[in-house]
Amino acid sequence: DIQMTQSPSSLSASVGDRVTITCQASQDISNYLNWYQQKPGKAPKLLIYDASNLETGVPSRFSGSGSGTDFTFTISSLQPEDIATYYCQQYDNLPPAFGGGTKVEIK
Amino acid sequence: EVQLVESGGVVVQPGGSLRLSCAASGFTFDDYAMHWVRQAPGKGLEWVSLISWDGGSTYYADSVKGRFTISRDNSKNSLYLQMNSLRAEDTALYYCAKVAGRPTVGAFDIWGQGTMVTVSS
């Protein structure tokens, strides 16, 4: 099974800061990587699919990049409503697997 | 409105059984593969199971294989998860999720609100 390692597990940043989260796959997954946002008490929401494609309706301050084993998720200018836990997910091989999550807080 | 609504979560004793349901609306249900994903309290997301659009293919996480069975009734726009031999570690919020596009596995673009299963004596 493919393991997904996300880092950091948590971070604190100021409003307006650039925030970067990384996700590393245990083997090459091409670009079969998605990113989700989960706010407290809510279901996850798809933000980025296929490593770098912004889901419809998602603000452009969110972006993703990478391929192979190393991926990056970026919030270009952190907003108060971005407080959430973010997860990466691979679907190159079964079973699909999520990273451990990154909790983003406001400093 | 595209929507998934889960139901069936309760408190059940270890070794017990339970069937979760997920009612779909606002999209052509039988065009899409469906998945179950769970989240233990305070923990991350764990993929559980998938079923193809026609029910012909299913797949399970090792942690539930042999105990859980996924199924669907396209005439009722409904997805199910039969859970047997439940263990304390199955305690979680269970989400159903729709796959974007036609692949069996991909991005989960629609999620339900979740239904809570608690396994406790």
Image (cartoon, rainbow, N blue to C red):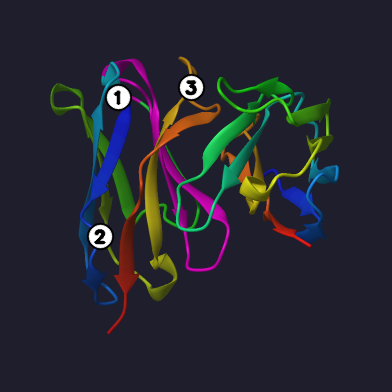
CA separation in Å, label 1 and label 3? 16 Å
What chain letter is assigned to the residue under label 3?
B
Q: Amino acid at mark 3?
A: Ala
Task: Residue under label 3, please give it.
Answer: B100
Type of amino acid under label 2: Gly
- Decide if residue A45 is in sight here: yes
Classify the position of the N terminus of chain B by image quarter: top left
Within-10-Å neighbours for mark 1: few <14, some 14–19, many 20+? few
Mark 1 falls within which chain?
Answer: B
First reached walking from the N terminus: tag 1 or tag 2: 1
Q: Chain of mark 2?
A: B
Q: Which residues are magenta?
A: B30-56
Q: Which mark is residue B9?
A: 2
Residue type at mark 1 is Glu
Q: According to the image, label 1 marks what residue?
A: B1
Labels 2 and 3: the sequence-earlier one: 2
